[in-house]
Image (tube, rainbow, N blue to C red):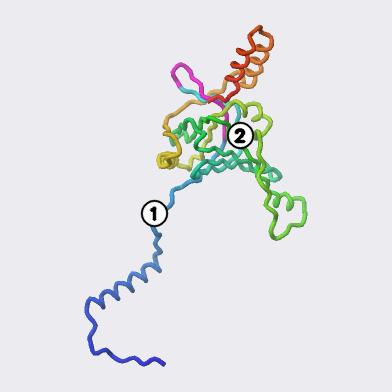
Amino acid sequence: MLIFTASKNAPKEVDIRALQFEEKDRLERLQYPRTNGPQPAQRTFTTVNTYCGYWTFSGTQLIFSPQYRNDRQGKLLFGEDSAALILAPSSPMDSEHRIDIAYHTIDSVVLGHQSDPTITFALLYAPKLFELPNVTDKFANVGLARTSQPRQLPKTRLESLDAHHSQVARTCWVYRVMLDHSQKISIVSNLLKANRKVLSHVSMTTNCEKNTVPFATQLSTLENALQTQSVPFTVKFQVHRLSTNGCT
């Protein structure tokens, strides 16, 4: 049992005002919730297509020459040590694919402008490619029973995304993604500026022109020429190595 009695000392005016202010602040927080601290920066961006190719020039104009195009939508995520591009399945029975680009493998990054929201990564090494199987959905489609906790299968390492990509994946290490126009390319620029693991980037408009002769055909022509010409083996080896050691 609690018994309350009036204090002999009257409350101070400043104490009463402090209690009134605290109560008013508490009610305002309940009515208008506040966020604690600054909002985290956006790190995930919607993409509409992906290209693989190489940089070239038309006179003094820098040109991107695509040798492969994938029109699957995806999500580009910027992490602490790498960027990952998740490509949606092309059909309900297919799997997602992932392209991992470690920051230390990036040679340069070129950003387009808001009217052309592209991000082009020129790499020193080929990116890591994975298949992310969605076994749960596949079982549902064929009517097989599922447990409440489906087993999570590991991702599968791939050499290429598909047969077309396999023709250039070994040699073309420039990857370009087109962002959805609702995404702000300026946010990507700020992310790259804040990340010390990424080399400085440039923002400029670069045209996209596909070579009339596919790169795979050019390589095949070169290999045939090296086999038929009476060129010393050391020269053949160096030329072949230079032409197949990644085009940036």
Query: Magenta segment: does it hold 216?
Result: no
Q: Residue at x 66, y 41 (%)?
A: 131
Query: Residue flagged by tag 1: what amino acid is it?
Result: Pro
Outermost residue toward the front in this view? 234
Report which residue position mark 2 lands on: 70
Q: Magenta stretch: give its range.
A: 50-61
Number of other residues with Cα within 10 Å of mark 2, as a class: few under 14, some 14 to 19, many 20 or more: some
In the drawing, what numbered circle is on residue 194? Answer: none
Q: Which residue in the structure is indicated by mark 1?
A: 38
- Residue 58: where, in percent of width, then height? 48, 18
Residue occupying the point 66% across, 33% down: 159
Q: How many marks?
A: 2
Give the SS element for disc 1: loop
Mark 1 neighbour density, 10 Å: few (under 14) some (14–19) many (20 or more): few
Q: Is residue 28 above or below residue 75?
A: below
Q: Which percent across, then down, holds residue 218?
A: 62, 17
Q: CA distance from mark 1 to mark 2?
A: 37 Å
